[in-house]
Image: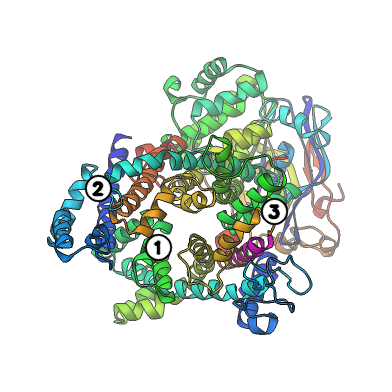
Amino acid sequence: MGERILTVRGLKTHYYIGGRVVKAVDGLDFDLERCEALGIVGESGCGKSTAALSVMGLIPLGAGRVVGGQVLFKGKSLLNLSSEEMRKIRGNEISMIFQEPMVSLNPVLTIGRQVSEVFMVHKGLNRREALDEAIKILSQVGIPAPGQMVREYPHRLSGGMRQRVMIAMAIACSPEVLIADEPTSELDVTVQDQVLRLLRELKEKMGMAMLLITHDLGVVAENVRNVLVMYAGRAVEYSDVPGLFKEPMHPYTRGLVASVPGPGAAGKKLGGIKGEPPNPFDLPGGCRFHPRCEYAREICRIREPDLVKVGDGRLCACHLYNNW
Amino acid sequence: MENTWSRFLRNKPAMAGLFLVAAITLAAVFAPYITRYHPTEQLIWTEGSKVQLVPPCGRFWFGTDIYGRDVFSRVVYGARTSLLIGTASTVISLAIGVTLGALAGYYGGVVDDIVSWLANVFFAFPFILFVLALVAYLPPGLPLMYAAIGIVNWAGVARLVRGQVLSVREKEYVEAAEALGGSGARVILRHILPNIMAPVLVQATLGMGGIIMLESSLSFLGFGIQPPTPSWGYEIDQGRQYLLAGAWWWSVFPGMAIMALVLGFNLLGDGLRDVLDPRTEAGERRWGRG
Amino acid sequence: MVIYTIKRLLAAVPVVIGVIAVVFILTSIVPGDPARIIAGKTADPETIQRIREELGLDRPLWEQFTDFFKGVLTFDLGRSYRNNRPVTQVIMERLPLTAKLAVSSTALAVVAGVSLGVVSAVKKDFMLDHGGRVLALLGISAPSFWIGLMLILLFCVKLRWIPGTGDGGWMYLVLPVITLAIRPAAFIARLTRSGMLEVLGQDYIRTAWAKGLPGRAVVLGHALKNAMIPVVTVAGTCMAEMMGGAIVVEKLFSLPGIGRLGLEAILARDFPVIRGQVLLLALVFVAANLLVDLTYPLFDPRIKYGGKGRHE
């Protein structure tokens, strides 16, 4: 067990759409240790991206906000920082990579400018020095001919190359935590593996902790040590990867795992769980999964289960395991 | 439809615009009932001298001009000129623009090339000078002015309609109508035009503001409607000579009238666009914590 | 880039030809015999006939058009009916003043409009935004000559900061430039605001925040350049339209620019001058649009390469 670098407790992030409240994240707990690779899985809309944006302090202004809970980074509460203090952490100590490489780079600025400004902002380098560093970091993420690439604009690059540029910007300042939000779901299957391998290698080499957010259990199986399963804004299960696939505990997780032929089947989408994902405007009371759960009992409709220890380092939020 | 209507009613700027336009239109229609004097009547004090350049007071709300005419009456009657020219010119530009735009969009090819070329040429023309030349050379009279301004504005309408028709004509209902053997004109009139009226309505509303502005510029330059019929731009031009001497009311009030009416149409047009165009309705999001 | 430039240039040619044709038609079919105007009211029929022949007015319209067309290509627009001086010379005398007006006003409008729009977008729904939007709305709703009049009332009459109207030094140009700039500034402010709001919601702006850039760098370094693309279009059109709009402002401030020249020419039925002027303004418009097209790649690198432009 290493040192905890990121601790999230009771995080609640709500959006306000047309006068109604969407509880995108509603009481999320998890820990990330130094150098750990943690996967967060769940269906789209379960709040995993919102959780990541909340940690980064990037919830869209006016659309929503973090309404409760704690985010501790190296013991420091991020939610209480001033925007200037938070800015100095973003892209420097905690970085993030996004899902859509096609639209995540500024179309009117050169690659060189976009990568080098990270060095200028966080390391105080001048334009020249920053560009030299940018070229170095681009070659580290496997961009061919980085010296020429810095003069190019994003639309000239393929999706995989753009994602590599995104990664280069994220790791430029050797962050301690790297959050990757569906980093490969928009890429071709062959490119997916390359990008994931690159992320794994960089994580090892630079000693970063990584939060890998995905809906793809196959991606989880090969790239992280521990997994957090989210459903409707909350964590429902936490486990190491072998345990999760061998013996999924939460009925939702069982459904997820059953829908994947086995570890190594990357690219498979989640499915195979009966019923509709919950309506974000009107979440069911009690356990949020109970309308789709085949083990649902009376108590599931009334009381929300807590995330409790259910075995060797494993956590689960389900009334089935309450007598442990 | 119900939804659109109620959203329109809840759109405060649009309602403010509607109020301005409606109020001014009503004032123009019922001008004789809300003004005390006829706009061309040269008033005379009981002792025999002219009622010249009287500042605004209880009797002459907007004061009087050098000829002893009531500025309030002239402003109210001036609304008739503006609205008449605005409406008539809009009708003309819509008639030309919608027809040519629809033909260009529907038939494409050479028709489209010619219409688009013509529209581009008209876009390149300096509007004011162009209309000035038209008004100055052709025999004087009001209908001419409608035509002149209408001709100027058709190109914008045509361009809009062409684009709309292009996007609508691939839709199923149009293809279905064509498959059923509808003739070109019939398909355009029955199936295409009703579906593109919303943006045209928005453009026409915003265009009204522009036309009223153009009319006031023309009459400011002395090429507008024949005096003594009141027109706001002409009032401003006349009044400005006395502005430096302190008789500000003669040109200030007509200017405010232009602004109010144009503002009304602009607010109404913006509001209609917000309500009718679903693209602008999508929630805006902004990243970051500012 | 070269191909793009050539394409744009070629696209402008038919428009220019159309403009020349419409200008010719417009000034040819109108009532009023130019020969009679030149000769004066008392002239006898022989004199009028002789002038008509000299001007080539007795020849078929088609030949007159080709002559006119050739003249345009060689910058020979004939002579003014009023004083028999070459039209190009008459226009070139008056052009610098109006050009000065239009260029300064455009610069002012862009700077003021973009600043106001950016502030409004960044402070969306705050007082500053509301104030800015109301100001912009009033700006596009008021006629420029009236705004100019109010400025005269304020600065010349009440405050006495600026001398009256007329042409004499830069002080006399301050108010005309402001007057001419207000409407386009208001328009650009609205355009910038909506453009910025759209851009600020894009994913690449989220990336910029995620990199830890300060707000200034995100707004000015990342968002503004994207939002400027439509503004460039408007700014170009603005400058061309100002040359025409100057007619009102030049009358208001008694400035002897080409606007005033046009007015004088129309009143005197001085056809060659009117022709020349309409043609000049139309060509300025075409040239401004061309300039805008050629400026696009500076703001949007995606245009440079693909023949089809931005949507690949």
Q: Please name which of the two marks, 2 or 1, marks the residue nearer to the observer.
A: 2
- Per the model, the C-alpha gap separating discs 3 and 2 is 84 Å
Q: Is residue A158 left or right of residue B238?
A: left
Whether discs 3 and 2 lie on one chain: the answer is no
Where, by quadrant of the figure, is residue B143 drawn?
bottom left
Q: Secondary structure at mark 2?
A: loop
Q: Is residue A170 left or right of residue B210?
A: right
- Per the model, the C-alpha gap separating discs 3 and 1 is 73 Å
Query: Does the magenta segment cover residue B256?
Result: yes
Res A272 visible: no
Residue numbers of the magenta segment: B248-262
Query: Does the magenta segment cover residue C312?
Result: no
Q: Which residue is mark 1?
A: B131
Res C224 visible: yes
- Per the model, the C-alpha gap separating discs 2 and 1 is 21 Å
Type of residue at label 2? Leu
Between B71 and C199, the one lying in front of the other is B71
Residue at x 75% of width, y 61% of height: A20
Q: Is residue C70 above or below residue B72?
A: above
Between A169 and C300, the one lying in front of the other is C300
Residue A173: x %, y % from top left: 64, 22
Residue C77, label in figure: 2
